[in-house]
Each structure stands twice: as C-alpha cells, then as structure tokens.
Image (cartoon, grey):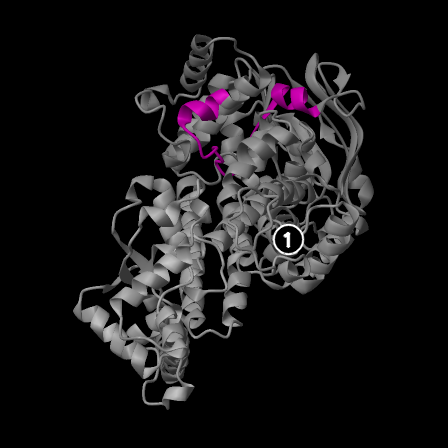
C-alpha cells in the first residue's frame, strides 16, 4: 500500500513538473496577446485624436467672422421713390467707404477699398431700413460682414510673405484695415451666419443650415421607412417564415445587399423613384427613399441577430400558457430584442447620414441656397455639402469644410449617444 | 450510450438467462420492448394516448406509446437520458409543433377529443394543458404580470379586482403568496430559483388548466426548494392531473401515483408507483431502478 502511495506522489510530482514547465510559455503568450490588443487600441485612439485635432484646428476659426462698422448717411433725397428697394444701396455703402477713406481716389484703389466688405453689405442695409424706415434721414452706424479675404487675413490664414501680386490682400488694404482697427471699426464676432443660412458662392455668406436641415429631413424619411419595414422583415424571417430554400435565398440576398456599393442604390433610385415614380429630384424625399434601400439590410441583419439572441425559454414560457405566436413575439420576444434592434437601426442611420455617393446620383449635389422647408424642397445634405465646399477654390472654404465636418461629427455623436441611451432605457434586466 | 458506458467496468448477474448489462441497447430484441408491461390504461382517463409515434426528421423518437393519464393523479415518467420522455411530454400540449422537423403520429385525446385533430387550436389547448419547464423561466416582468399574463391574453377577467383575485389565489395555491405578497411589483426574475419555479407553477395554474405537464421541474433546484415543489405537487393533485418527467427516482416515488418507465422511445412498463419500485416486472425497469444504468 505504501509503495502505491509513493508511486502516486511521484506521479503527482511529475505532473506538476510538466505543468510548471509549460506555465511560463502560457503566460508569455497571454502577455503578448494583451500587449498586442492594447497597442491596437492605442493606435486607434492616436488616429482618432489626430483626425479630430486636425479638423478642429482647421475648422474652429469658421465660427468667428470679421465685421466692419460703416457710418452711412441716409439722406431723405436718396429715398425719393415710394419703394425702399429702389434706392441705390450699393451706392450708399460705397459713399460711406469713400467718406471714411477720402484719400482713395484712383479707380483701382477704389475697387480694392470696396472689396473690403462683403457684397452682402447692401442687402444688410436694405433689410435694416425696411425693418425700420425711421432710419431714413439719419446717419446710423451699421456693422456689415467683411469680405472673406479680409476675414482670412485677420485670422492669419494668408501668407503675407509672398509677393503682393500673388496675394488676395494687398498692402493698401492692410493699411486701411489697420486704420479701421485703430478706430474700433473692425471687430470679430461669433459667426451666426454659418448656422443660419444656406450655401453661397461667397464664403462669408455660406452656412450649414440648409445642408443640416436637408440631412435631418432625409434621415427622418429613412428612419420612418426603414425601421418599421426592417423590423417587420426581421420578425417575419426569424419567427414566422418556414425554413426552406426560399428563405435561405432571401437571407443570402439580404446579406449581399448589405455589401452592394452605395452608388448602385443611387442609380436604382434615379431609375425607379425619380424616372419611374416621378419623385421630385434632388429632394430629401428621394434621398430618404434611396437611403432606406441602403439601410434596410443593416437593420434586418441586426434585427434578426437580436431576435436570435432572445433565449428560447421565454418563447416556451409564453407558448406554454397559451399565448399565440404573434402574442409571444410581440409581448415577450420583441421587447427583449428591441435594444439590439435600436442599436442596429442607429448604426444604419449613422451610415446613412454619412452617405454621399448615392445622393450624387439623384441630384442632391445641386447648388442650393434656399433652406428646405419640407421633404419635397430641393436640398443637399451634410456630406455632400462637405464635398462641395472641399471642392471650392476660395481659401475661406477650407475652414468651412472643416467646420461642416465638425457639425456632421456632432450629429453622429448625438445619434450614437441616443443609441446608448435608448439601449439602456429599453434593456430588461434579468 | 449510457447503458454501455456504465457496464464496462462492473459485472452484473444475468437475468432471465440473458446478460442485460452487457447487451447494448440496440441489441435488445424488439419483441421485448414493443409490448408495454403493466397497466397503461385507467378508467375515465383525462388524457389517453394511443400508438403515439414521434419522428424528428427520419429518426423515430417515440415508438408506439399507449398511456392514459387519470383525473387527479400524478404520473411520473422516468428513464435514462434521451429515452424520449420529454419528447412524449411535449406532445401532450403540442409543444413539439414549434420544432419544424418534428412529426407526431397516433392519437392523443384530452377529455375524449383528439388534440391533434385539424380543427383543434393549440392556443386554447395549451391553456387547458399547462406546462412547467426544467429551468425556471419567468417572464422578465413583475411577479404580478407573470401570473396575470395568461388570464389577460385569454380574456378571463373583466375587472382589475378579478385579476387581483386570480393572482392571489394562484400564488396561494403555489405556496408563494406569503413570500411575495408585499413585492408583487418586483421583477419575477429577482426571486430565488425555487421561488421562480413556484412562480412558473402559479403562472401555469392561473389559467385554470386541467392537466399540468412538468419537465424535470426540480432539476435546477436545491433540496429545500425541491421539497417545497414536491409538497406543492401533492396539493395540486387534488385539482389537476399532473404528468411529471423526473430523473430522481426518489422524487417519482414520493410524488406520483403511477410511474411509467421509458427506454429508447419505448414505454417499457407502467404501473402503480409502489409496485414499480418494489416489484418491477420488466427486467429493463428493474435494471434501471436498481441503478444499473441510467
């Protein structure tokens, strides 16, 4: 008996020895894997930080805008005509500049002087007077937008070391601006125009609101169509459809659709929605329909996955007390699958928000100044606006591009935060 | 094959001239398992099953079972794993309908009418034949809603007070009322395992079934919770017919009036529980209850 015990002990020792020998290797493998994973995360964070800082650095200045104070003389004789709009507002503005810088005489210099302020100044003045006609006959001071080149110069985005002829801002203009600054007639304010107006050829007048509203309408259409259709399709395929070759084919096709290049959906939308159904082109309605096609596979796949993850015991419990199939699904399975479905939907919507290519096909790349008031008004969307501005030659559009990207990212962060919130809210603890 | 696995290292006395222990299950001659030994039929049965065959695809899981379930009795179904007792149980309320490859032949009557008849709707059938599962599976809702769900979907009540009454009596019958009456709005999933299982029993009896099917209801419970559920079964017998699948033979002997022994899809022997455990007539039954396999 004792020899047997000894034998056992010896064997145990041997086993222990073998295990110990291998331990080092096992731990090393674990360490290597952990550090690889950690460096992957670090790399990702580094990329994101780089991206965000570069965008913010380029774009932050778009949120401020230079304004110049003009003291305009609104003599009554300039408004003899009944209609205020008939008055020569550009002339009044030019006169006012002339008064401020009486030494400017030559034609070329005058041109440079007038170029200090935005073309919009005359409209600003007109609006002001139309709103308050009592201004006529007085000499009010009004603040008008500076030209985009002036704005760029003040933000230090123009390289003053290059030859004068190559610059958008000439030395004379710099002198005048210095004078204005000294007199307190030049200030930098928060750029409300950027958030309240649509696109423009003039950078200082261009705003993001048109594209943001276009994106909002497009996404609303997409959500309103793709969520119910996607969820219904997922429920039918997962819970009700018989498992046969046809449902297999459908499943393969849905997975394929999720991988189809988005531009093809754009072509499809152009052919069917616009040419065949007559949906007005370049509108959020057409865009929403196209993006619905694109988002559906994502929602269906996510929906099916979350339905699959609901434990079968819940279905059995409901069927066991005599619930019908539909009651089982809607009372018990769907509430448990909802958080996953919502997450899938918002991922699909975020994808739709950033989608550009299919919208080019249906004309949402058009240059549209008006802010859309409904889903049938022509409009553009944020990513297309970014594309348009990135393509514009004016230096000032660079910062607008980055600012538009910031707005798009803000949209995305908001949507993802909503996804997290909804998931937390609908999650059922058990 | 459990039979083979447990018999390799030990030797068994031979029975009826054959070494049962050594023969693999497939080698048992068909004529010795086809005919059920004992008394499968009762007078005035609540449920009666005749020549029930169940197929999963091409595989035959239940091979011609005849069995009656009487009123106010507990029938225990025992047998080694994979012998088909759960499959058979799930035929009794057509729970197998949810398995697409599953096919049931033969006839199963509840109160004289065939439940597999084309005109029978499974929804009311499952209200009449309730089921309690192996793992407690309360809905992730409040205790109250767990019980109230069945009566609500069947429209059994018209007023909140009636529903309150059903919830209370169901919980009292399930012996859970005293423990949960102050926290009916708490989630049912927050209860202990034994309480959850009694909640599931309360949920099943809330729709006033005639038969309650229990599929190993205590296998996930500790001994104390098991004892409570067994006491509950004994009480419920006064009102309902109960069919229980169990792996614990002591449990079968404690709670049931009749016991049915299944072996590889065949119903080998049925009889009063006491006789089955003291004087089994079939050698397979004897081998199982004396612990030689299973």
Going by the image, does A210 lie left or right of B109? Answer: left
Subunit of label 1: A
Q: Could you tell me residue A216's position as x and y percent? A: 51, 48
Q: Quadrant of residue A98?
A: bottom left
Q: Could you tell me residue A295's position as x and y percent? A: 61, 53
State yes or no: residue B248 in magenta: no
Q: Could you tell me residue B225's position as x and y percent? A: 39, 33
Going by the image, does B241 lie left or right of B235? Answer: right
Q: Quadrant of the C terminus of chain A?
A: top left
Q: Residues within 10 Å of mark 1 (few under 14, many from 20)?
A: many
Q: Quadrant of the N terminus of chain A?
A: bottom left
State yes or no: residue B127 in magenta: yes
Identified at 38% across, 85% down, the residue is: A21
- Secondary structure under the numbered disc 1 in the rendered image: loop
The residue tagged 1 is A282
**Depth order, front residue of A322/B222:** A322
Q: Quadrant of residue A229?
A: top right
Residue numbers of the magenta segment: B122-148
* Vertical position of residue A73 compared to residue B182: above or below: below
Examine the rendering and report whether any part of residue B13 can be seen.
no
Identified at 47% across, 33% down, the residue is: B138
Going by the image, does B81 lie left or right of A401? Answer: right
* Vertical position of residue B56 compared to residue B211: above or below: below
């Amino acid at each position: 008996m004792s020899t047997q015990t000894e034998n056992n002990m010896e064997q145990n020792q041997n086993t222990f020895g073998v295990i110990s020998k291998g331990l080092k290797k096992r731990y090393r493998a674990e360490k290597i894997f952990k550090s690889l994973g950690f460096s992957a995360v670090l790399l990702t964070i580094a990329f994101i930080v780089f991206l965000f800082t570069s965008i913010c650095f380029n774009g932050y200045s778009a949120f401020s805008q230079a304004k110049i104070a003009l003291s305009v003389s609104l003599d009554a004789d300039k408004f003899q005509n009944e209609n205020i709009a008939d008055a020569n507002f550009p002339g009044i503005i030019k006169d006012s500049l002339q008064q401020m810088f009486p030494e400017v005489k030559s034609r070329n210099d005058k041109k440079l002087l007038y170029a200090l302020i935005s073309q919009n100044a005359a409209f600003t003045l007109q609006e002001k007077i139309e709103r308050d006609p009592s201004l006529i006959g007085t000499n009010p001071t009004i603040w008008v937008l500076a030209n985009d080149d002036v704005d760029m110069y003040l933000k230090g985005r123009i390289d003053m070391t290059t030859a004068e002829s190559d610059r958008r801002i000439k030395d004379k203009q710099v002198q005048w601006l210095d004078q204005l600054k000294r007199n307190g007639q030049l200030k930098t304010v928060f750029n409300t125009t950027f958030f309240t107006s649509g696109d423009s050829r003039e950078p200082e007048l261009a705003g993001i609101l048109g594209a943001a509203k276009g994106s909002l309408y497009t996404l609303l259409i997409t959500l309103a169509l793709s969520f119910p259709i996607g969820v219904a399709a997922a429920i039918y395929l997962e819970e009700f459809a018989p498992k046969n070759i046809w449902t297999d084919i459908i499943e393969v096709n849905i997975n394929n659709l999720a991988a189809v290049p988005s531009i093809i959906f754009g072509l499809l939308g152009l052919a069917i929605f616009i040419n065949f159904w007559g949906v007005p082109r370049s509108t959020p309605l057409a865009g929403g329909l196209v993006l619905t096609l694109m988002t559906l596979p994502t929602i269906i796949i996510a929906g099916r996955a979350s339905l699959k993850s609901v434990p079968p015991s819940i279905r059995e419990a409901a069927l066991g007390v005599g619930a019908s199939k539909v009651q089982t699904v809607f009372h018990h399975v769907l509430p448990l699958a909802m958080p996953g479905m919502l997450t899938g939907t918002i991922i699909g919507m975020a994808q739709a928000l950033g989608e550009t290519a299919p919208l080019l096909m249906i004309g949402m790349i058009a240059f549209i100044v008006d802010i859309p008031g409904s889903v049938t008004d022509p409009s553009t969307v944020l990513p297309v606006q970014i594309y348009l501005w990135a393509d514009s030659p004016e230096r000032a559009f660079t910062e607008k591009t980055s600012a538009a990207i910031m707005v798009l990212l803000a949209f995305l962060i908001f949507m993802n935060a909503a996804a997290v919130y909804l998931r937390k809210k609908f999650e059922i603890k058990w | 094959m459990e039979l083979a696995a447990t018999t390799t290292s030990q030797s068994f006395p031979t029975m009826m001239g054959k070494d049962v222990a050594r023969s693999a299950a497939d080698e048992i001659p068909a004529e010795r398992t086809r005919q059920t030994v004992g008394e499968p039929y009762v007078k005035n049965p609540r449920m009666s099953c005749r020549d029930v065959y169940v197929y999963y695809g091409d595989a035959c899981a239940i091979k011609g079972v005849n069995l009656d379930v009487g009123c106010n009795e507990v029938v225990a179904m025992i047998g080694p794993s994979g012998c088909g007792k759960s499959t058979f149980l799930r035929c009794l309320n057509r729970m197998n309908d949810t398995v697409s490859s599953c096919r049931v032949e033969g006839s199963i009557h509840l109160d004289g009418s065939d439940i597999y008849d084309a005109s029978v709707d499974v929804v009311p059938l499952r209200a009449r034949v309730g089921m309690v599962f192996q793992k407690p599976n309360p809905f992730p809702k409040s205790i109250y809603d767990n019980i109230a769900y069945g009566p609500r979907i069947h429209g059994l009540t018209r007023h909140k007070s009636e529903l309150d009454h059903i919830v209370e009596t169901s919980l009292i019958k399930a012996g859970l009322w005293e423990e949960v009456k102050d926290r009916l709005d708490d989630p049912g999933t927050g209860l202990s395992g034994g309480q959850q299982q009694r909640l599931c029993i309360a949920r099943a009896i809330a729709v006033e079934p005639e038969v309650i099917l229990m599929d190993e209801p205590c296998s996930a419970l500790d001994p104390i919770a098991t004892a409570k559920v067994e006491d509950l079964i004994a009480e419920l017998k006064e009102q309902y017919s109960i069919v229980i699948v169990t792996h614990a033979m002591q449990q079968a002997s404690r709670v049931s009036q009749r016991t049915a022994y299944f072996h590889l899809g065949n119903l080998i022997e049925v009889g009063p529980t006491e006789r089955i455990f003291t004087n089994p007539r079939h050698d397979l039954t004897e081998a199982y209850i004396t612990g030689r396999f299973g």
